[in-house]
Amino acid sequence: MGEIRNPIKKSSIEKKNKILEKGFTLMCEKGYHNVNSVDIAKYAGVSTGIIYQYFTDKRDIFIEGVKNYSSNIMFPMIDILDNTKIDKNNLEKILNIMIDSFIDTHKMSKKAHEELIAMSHIDDEINQIFKDNELKMNEKIVNTLKYNNFNVKNLNEKVHIIIGLIDNFCHEIVYHAHKSLNYDEMKKEVINIVLYLLKD
């Protein structure tokens, strides 16, 4: 196997990105263990040899895909935090927007998320990527709240609880969908809990 290329030319960068996108999508749709490099090459419309010019193996593709996916999941929430002045008067409205955005992001990549969760239980590196991104999101929210004068005791710990609560609510809607539950009312309860946790 030859040396892994770091593409510089636009065409090479586009080719690598195509392999990454197609390979990651295929592994998420069919399952990581049900796909090999030949399958990825065929799906991406390239030769198997081309894949090994840019990636060491299919796991290398999957890991890069996980990093991109995790960033894309976080981006809408970070964008909201970066472009919105948050105070106690509009916090409830912003929470509604953030939760809806988080749900939409999960719905758009349902199969990917399911496969990633499964892989995170058996692959330490993937699990660490999730942990690192969770901590980055936690830190971002804490810093934003502090900047906007939310002087709350144990803010770091409370934000961690809030992220977990919202994430579980999104999973309930997207993956579980219990017909006996009223999700509009559940969303109100989630927001009420968050508002309570962020009280002075």
Image (spheres, rainbow, N blue to C red):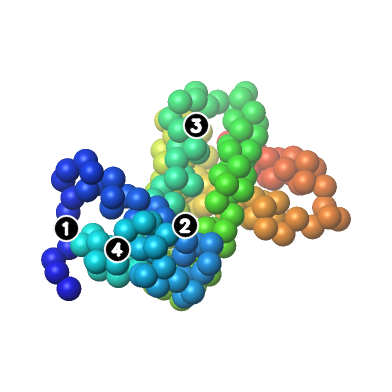
Q: Which mark is residue 5?
A: 1
Q: Position of residue 139 (x, y in %)?
A: 41, 45
> What residue appears at the point 24 percent right and 66 percent down from the top-left corner?
49
Q: Position of residue 100 (x, y in %)?
A: 63, 38
What is the secondary structure assignment of the residue under circle 2?
helix
On the picture, is 2 further left or further right than 183? left
Which one is nearer the viewer's eye here, 45 or 17?
Answer: 45
Mark 3 Cα-neighbour bin, 10 Å: few <14, some 14–19, many ≥20: some
Q: Is 92 located above or below residue 15 in the figure?
A: above
Which one is nearer the viewer's eye here, 199 or 127?
Answer: 127
Q: CA distance from mark 1 to mark 3?
A: 36 Å
Foreground mark, 2 or 4, reads: 4
Which one is nearer the viewer's eye here, 194 or 13?
Answer: 13
Q: Is 200 located above or below residue 105 in the figure?
A: above
Foreground mark, 4 or 3, reads: 4
**On the rendered image, what quadrant is the C terminus found in?**
top right
Q: Where is mark 3, residue-wise?
A: 80
Q: CA distance from mark 4 to mark 1?
A: 16 Å
Q: Is 167 located above or below residue 4 in the figure?
A: above
Q: Amino acid at mark 1?
A: Arg
Q: Where is mark 2, residue-wise?
A: 25
Q: Which mark is residue 47?
A: 4
Q: Earlier in the sequence, mark 2 or mark 4?
A: 2
> What residue appears at the point 58 percent right and 38 percent down from the top-left corner?
101
Q: Position of residue 28 (x, y in %)?
A: 50, 62
**On the rendered image, what quadrant is the N terminus found in?**
bottom left
Q: Amino acid at mark 4?
A: Ser
> What residue appears at the point 50 percent right and 31 percent down from the top-left corner?
80
